[in-house]
Image (tube, rainbow, N blue to C red):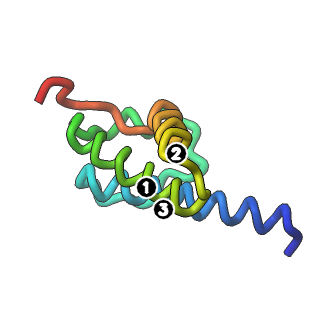
Amino acid sequence: MTRVEQKINKERQLLKELIDKMFEIAGHNLKFEDVEGRKDNWFQQHTMTETQNEEWKEWGTKLLAKKRRYGKKLADREMRMLDLYCGLKISNPNP
């Protein structure tokens, strides 16, 4: 396996860990493999509360800071971008 393939595999594993945790926190019985490669808006078909979303972003920020050796600010920005890209729809904006 080349260095590029290793890096891609490592990034895929990190994304898998983040998406799996998102589904776990939201209470959905889904995994990364269930949505991988789908072209539809799968992230809008499932919901999570604003509190669950914040919990996921906090957890993911810590994970990114640890695994990628990011500072808190950069890890937080990366999680917010991931949330915009494939975060679940917020079902209850004002809990």
Pick whichever of labels 3 and 1 is earlier in the sequence: 3
Query: Callout 2: 10 Å neighbours few (<14), some, many (20+)?
Result: many
- Figure check: 7 above or below 60: below
Residue at 48 percent of width and 46 percent of height: 72
State if disc 1 and disc 3 touch (CB < 8 Å). Answer: no
Q: Give how far apart the Cα atoms at labels 2 and 3 are.
A: 15 Å
Place of residue 73 in the rendered image (x, y in percent of width and height, measured from the top left)? 50, 39
Callout 1: helix, strand or loop?
helix
State if disc 1 and disc 2 touch (CB < 8 Å). Answer: yes
Callout 2: helix, strand or loop?
helix
**Residue bearing mark 1:** 62
Outermost bottom residue: 1
Query: Callout 3: 10 Å neighbours few (<14), some, many (20+)?
Result: some
Q: Quadrant of residue 92?
A: top left
**Residue bearing mark 3:** 17
Q: Amino acid at mark 3?
A: Glu
Q: Give how far apart the Cα atoms at labels 2 and 1 are.
A: 7 Å
Residue at 46 percent of width and 55 percent of height: 18
Pick whichever of labels 2 and 1 is earlier in the sequence: 1
Q: Quadrant of residue 21?
A: bottom left
State if disc 3 and disc 2 touch (CB < 8 Å). Answer: no
**Residue bearing mark 2:** 75
47 left or right of 14?
left
Residue at 42 percent of width and 60 percent of height: 31
Place of residue 9 in the rendered image (x, y in percent of width and height, measured from the top left)? 70, 65
Q: Amino acid at mark 2?
A: Ala
